[in-house]
Amino acid sequence: MNKLRTGAFHSGMILLSLLWLGPVIWVVVMSTRSFDDIAAHGVGSLPRSFTLDTYRQAWTDGGELRALINSMLVTVPSVALSLGLAAMAAFALSRFRIPGRRTILLLMLAGNLLPPQILLIPVAKFSELTGLYDTLWALIAVQVGFGLGFYTFVLHGFMRDLPGEIQEAATIDGAGTAQIFTKVMLPLTRPALAALGALSFTWIFNDLLWAITVLRTDDNMPVTPALLGLQGQFVSSWNVIAAGTVIAAVPTVAVFLRFQRHFVSGLALGAVK
């Protein structure tokens, strides 16, 4: 009976994996087919050609290189600033007796509960008034501002559950507040920081809504809005569009694989807490 259940479980997992991987494999295969092959036999047919010229077209003619650079210029500073500020705020709110700290935490989190659609016009107008509209700085500010509350809430939970004796021992040894934060709290919350870093990188890198809200010029567009432009430029060239999609997915997959161990341990630690 146990063997039967195990076999059924593995079979079900294999089917679910194939169901999830099917569209991914289909896009990758289509990105290596020629335009004539797809036009003659359809996008759902078996491949009868192989070419990598589609990646060159998406990379140079479609502007994927410029879009990827813009995405990295936005994503890396946004993740670093968000997690850095969130870690400092969570440390202060979890380890010190600050009046109204629960209210402060709830107010920081409340911004994430609002539908982003109702904030599009205010954010666009505010970026115009500050002179940041259609600049990457505007998108960085938006990503940091709207992610800070959630990251602080998550890190607050991790730091709050750390034993207070650790901080007391560091204080007795002569460590100041900055040393306790950098040398004690940050290393202990590394799994949570890694998990949040991987998630925030994916969210910010793949963002479309805020990018098209505060940006207008094609030269400033990150990779996800650039894919819309690629679809308009290569209307019937589904192979080039598929190649651009594969290129856009590479950075997020690489980040997840790099931090997979920390990501899983962070989720496990959060489940236990």
Image (tube, rainbow, N blue to C red):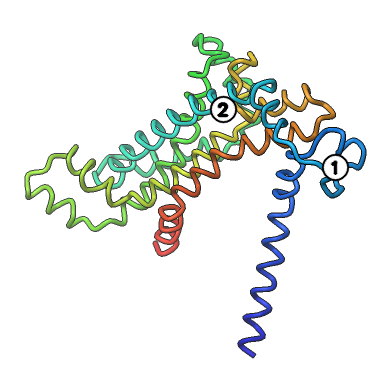
- The residue that appears at 53% across and 10% down in the rendered structure is 129
**Where residue 18 appears, x then y in whole percent?**
71, 60
Q: Residues within 10 Å of mark 2 (few under 14, many from 20)?
A: many
Res 252 label: none
Q: Earlier in the sequence, mark 1 or mark 2?
A: 1
Q: Is residue 217 above or below residue 148?
A: above
Left or right, residue 4 beside residue 134: right
Left or right, residue 53 beside residue 263: right
Quadrant for the C terminus, please: bottom left
Q: Label 1 belongs to which residue?
A: 43
- The residue that appears at 50% across and 32% down in the rendered structure is 146
Q: Nearer the viewer, residue 32 or 271?
A: 32
**Where residue 130 appears, x then y in whole percent?**
49, 11
Q: Label 2 belongs to which residue?
A: 68
Q: Amino acid at mark 2?
A: Leu
Q: Amino acid at mark 1?
A: Val
Q: Is residue 43 above or below residue 128?
A: below
Mark 1 residue element: loop
Q: Residues within 10 Å of mark 1 (few under 14, many from 20)?
A: some
- The residue that appears at 68% across and 78% down in the rendered structure is 8
Left or right, residue 50 beside residue 225: right
Q: How far apart are the two marked residues, 1 and 2, measured between alpha carbons? A: 27 Å
Q: Nearer the viewer, residue 145 or 228?
A: 228
